[in-house]
Image (cartoon, rainbow, N blue to C red):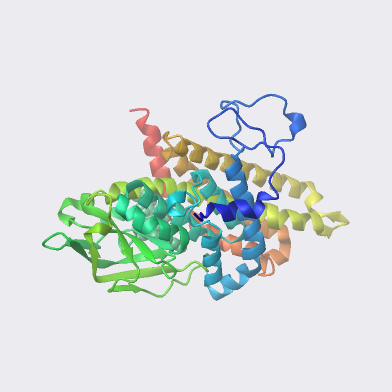
Amino acid sequence: MFTLRRPIASILRKNLHKNVTALSIGHTRSLSSIPSDDFDHELTEKTSPITVFTEDEQMTRDAVRQWAREELQPIVRDMDNEAKLRPEILQALFDQGFMGMEIPAEYNGSELSFTSACLAVEEISRVDPSTAILVDIHNTLNNNAVRFWGSEDLQKQWLPRLATDTASSFCLSEADSGSDAFAMKTTATASPDGSYYTINGTKLWISNAKEAGVFLLFANADPSKGYKGITAFMVDANTEGIHVGKPENKLGLKASSTCPLTFENVQVDASQVLGEVGLGYKYCINILNEGRIGIAAQQIGIAKGCLYDIALPYMMERKQFGSAIGDFQGMQHQYAQMATEIHAAEVMMYNACRLKEAGLPFVKEASMVKLFSSQVSERTASKTIEWLGGIGFTKDLMAEKMYRDCKVGSIYEGSSNIQLQTIAKLISAEYK
Ligand SMILES: Cc1cc2nc3c(=O)[nH]c(=O)nc-3n(C[C@H](O)[C@H](O)[C@H](O)COP(=O)(O)OP(=O)(O)OC[C@H]3O[C@@H](n4cnc5c(N)ncnc54)[C@H](O)[C@@H]3O)c2cc1C
């Protein structure tokens, strides 16, 4: 049977690292990034560095990097100008297996790790954070919510489509419920025989709504119970009564459609309830905790794209006063500082991934890295524009786009204040 794992593997199989050393731990980690001469003792699980990945993860990262640079980069500026994701990019994301990162092979997914999904988001963000947010929301929020809480029937119905041809949106926010997400007004009223629900309400800020074939929707099925009435539904985008509004005219992430979404007497079969009625709030909290690591991956990708793909090549080339500007100590200290902050953020992100994969508590770490990486991306994007001088302020290079695209990192999937609240709550609980 054809599985989408193959495209990922096939792209770079020929370039696969040669220095792979097997570790005597649960899964093999590739050591290709470590020069073999410097490495004369066997790694154990205890000593394995957090920046060393499994063979699958490294292959994924390399494959996504190659695709993003060869296929995506040439049209990123046009997509930003047109404020539209090109259909061929969406198709390629499916063809490459990037839309079913953790979906099991039996459902035509790539059956990779959460770390792999985050590495994919990071690599795409280095080139285009707009495309990356589609991949991120689809994989880390929607696919995983179906995998974790969907019934077997719901999984059979949606996972193969999510992996191969159907983009998705995560529909939570409303006009009066942003940070206070559970104050939502959208209702889902059960039919007398309980066989279907009628949905009414308007969601706001829904990413990828133009491209989505399915909406993971949160609506209140029993407002008398407050947030304990919130229920999650899989809603086919073609259902009668759904209206996707005009995309917002945004500062950044322009190629990502962010739309209002109105539900007017939309009938959804009871079989499309995700998990249990009234537990939507729990699923929402849990999946957003994970999703924050994905947003961190996006922000780290932006920071790396700025420093390593835009700023440093330019600084080593551009000469003033007879020297490359990157050789002036005043510049060296600045990019050394940003490289250090980026490294701190990536270590935090990979560690949050590993904590999650190990089934250990990771909520505090996820909030911390989402908060920190959005600060690092802003600082790096801003510095990159300065380092490029006048050209940094133009659209000739991508720095100005990264500067615009990074800003939302401190707003969506929980603003920075909300992350600080979560971190403080978890820290203070240890002292009570
Ligand atoms: C580009 C983009 C894409 C988005 N995509 C999606 C999507 O796909 N699906 C979806 O459901 N939503 C999406 N959102 C919505 C996003 O999650 C919300 O914008 C975010 O949660 C903040 O809500 P708000 O805009 O209502 O701001 P508010 O909640 O009104 O917050 C405004 C300010 O008040 C602060 N604040 C609020 N409450 C507190 C508090 N208790 N303590 C301290 N400070 C506080 C916030 O930190 C913020 O600075 C998207 C938003 C954007 C901009």
Closer to us: 112 or 157: 157
Q: At 75% from the left edge and 30% from the top edge, which residue is drawn?
A: 38
Furthest residue toward left: 192
Q: Position of residue 124 (x, y in %)?
A: 58, 57
Examine the rendering and report whether any part of residue 86 can be seen: no
Q: At 64% from the left edge and 55% from the top edge, which residue is drawn?
A: 11
Examine the rendering and report whether any part of residue 9 can be seen: yes
Q: Is residue 198 left or right of residue 319?
A: left
Determine which quarter of the picture holds residue 202: bottom left
Closer to us: 244 or 180: 244
Q: At 20% from the left edge and 63% from the top edge, which residue is drawn?
A: 197
Q: At 68% from the left edge and 46% from the top edge, which residue is drawn?
A: 16
Closer to us: 28 or 39: 28
Count of numbered circles on the image: 0
Closer to us: 328 or 117: 117
Q: Position of residue 338 (x, y in %)?
A: 65, 47
Quadrant containing ligand 1: bottom left
Q: Quadrant of the C terminus?
A: top left
Q: Position of residue 292 (x, y in %)?
A: 45, 48
Furthest residue toward front: 1
Q: Is residue 136 left or right of residue 58?
A: left
Furthest residue toward right: 322
